[in-house]
Image (cartoon, grey):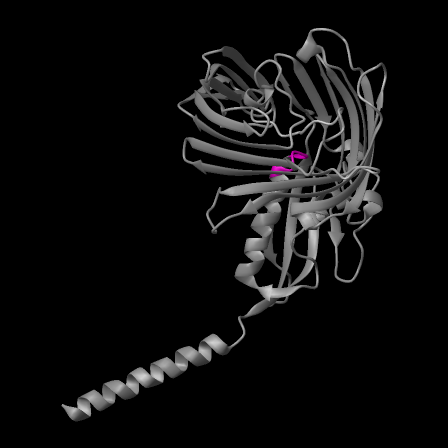
Amino acid sequence: MAAYRLANMRRSTSALALLILCSSLPAFCVELVWVRILSGDCDAVVWRPGVAWPSRPDSFPFEPSAVLSFATVAPGDSLPEARLEAKARLWERSLAESGRFSRATVLVTEAADDPDSRGLIVEAEAGAVPVFDGGAAYASMALPLAGGRRATVAMEGGANRASLAYRDEVFRDRPVVLEGRIIYENDLIETGTFVNNRLSAGLGFGPRLGPLGDVLFRVRGKLPLDNGAGVLLALDAELELTGLSFFGIEGLDGSLESLGSVYPGSTALRLEAESGLRLKLGAWAFACDAGLGLSSGALDSGELFRLDAGNLMLRGPEGWDRRTTGIRFARLDVRVAVLDCRLASWLSATLGPFAFAEAAKADDYQGQLEGIGGGLTMSFGSPVGVTVDLGYSLDASGEGALVFSASSKKSL
């Protein structure tokens, strides 16, 4: 019996030693030797080690940098194959969620005559349909691949606001963001008359943090066109992160955006933060958004918090002013895809209910603003790619409002 136990102990010790030895060995790595970009019938664009992003051939529909700037890996990198596959999936998801391509796939393949080398094939089709969003009192439209670049031209119009903006996220084929915008605003919705007319402009510049985010430093100015708010000059610092994965759960991702402003000649410092989580489980889609706005003192009379919880709660009761020193909100959306319809041989639609609940609290308002709403949502598939929401909402006082929006950004 003793000999049997001794033999078992020796086998266990040997197995443990082998396990420790194996875990201490480096994982088998492969080298990425090229990235090939394909689009339609155009000749392939190839990115090789040690060179900058390739230039755009005459017949190619977009700049190679518009795809390669989303890259999570580069030619010449050596890493475990499982890690390369994971980076390829992240790259593919970043392209698909950018709104700039109607189709995007990233495939790992073996390089010829070398079992330790790999290549990446990136197939992408430029999105031909502008992104738009609209509701009862506003509409916006953006072209997210302007000039074949990772750039966006956006326009917005509504009852009390109109704007034009340009943003290039790979300025001069470098990891640099450049943006500019001009905005006209008035207080038509708040007062019913065209008062407090003002014109704003801003210029931003900063580094890009890979495919998931960027840091932007911005100078903004606001000029009154009548006897409304005074002249405003502000300096901003903004951190924006998108497509973050949490806990390794497929389909669970989020975003974080923050903004700090300081006003020359004033002690007021403003901080805003917005975050969102998205989760899709089969036919169920969940979204949770939260925001926080704080100010160290009185803001300029023409400066408002940008935080928005679904265009319902932060509108607030009559006389409530968003020029508060502190505000917090949270919102939860639930959507369920119930029915799939084939409207034509080239068009499908998904129909289902949606519901939301939200709450906001402002320091200069007694009590908490609350509301619930719901209705039906219909998402039209490619090539239309539009989601329409129609429903009704109620706030805590029982006041109701129609919920209507049409967007090419949302989906069930």
Query: In the orientation shown, which residue stands out farthest toward the bottom?
Result: 3
Task: Quadrant for residue 26, please give it.
Answer: bottom right
**Magenta stretch: includes residue 100:** yes
Provide the major secondary structure of the magenta segment: loop
In the rendering, at what x and y percent does residue 98 appear? 65, 37
Determine the residue positioned at 64% across, 37% down: 294
Q: Is residue 172 left or right of residue 314?
A: right
- Frontmost residue, 372 versus 72: 372
In the rendering, at what x and y percent does residue 31 appear? 64, 65
Is residue 411 in view? no
Determine the residue positioned at 59% across, 54% down: 87
Query: In the orientation shown, which residue stands out farthest toward the top?
Result: 193
Task: Quadrant for residue 105, please give it.
Answer: top right
**Magenta stretch: includes residue 304:** no
- Frontmost residue, 320 versus 195: 320
Determine the residue positioned at 43% across, 26% down: 337
Is residue 172 in view? yes
4 over 56 or under it: above or below: below
- Frontmost residue, 394 versus 213: 394
- Frontmost residue, 405 versus 198: 198
Q: Read off the magenta span.
A: 97-101
In the rendering, at what x and y percent does residue 331 appear? 50, 30
Task: Quadrant for residue 7, please give it.
Answer: bottom left
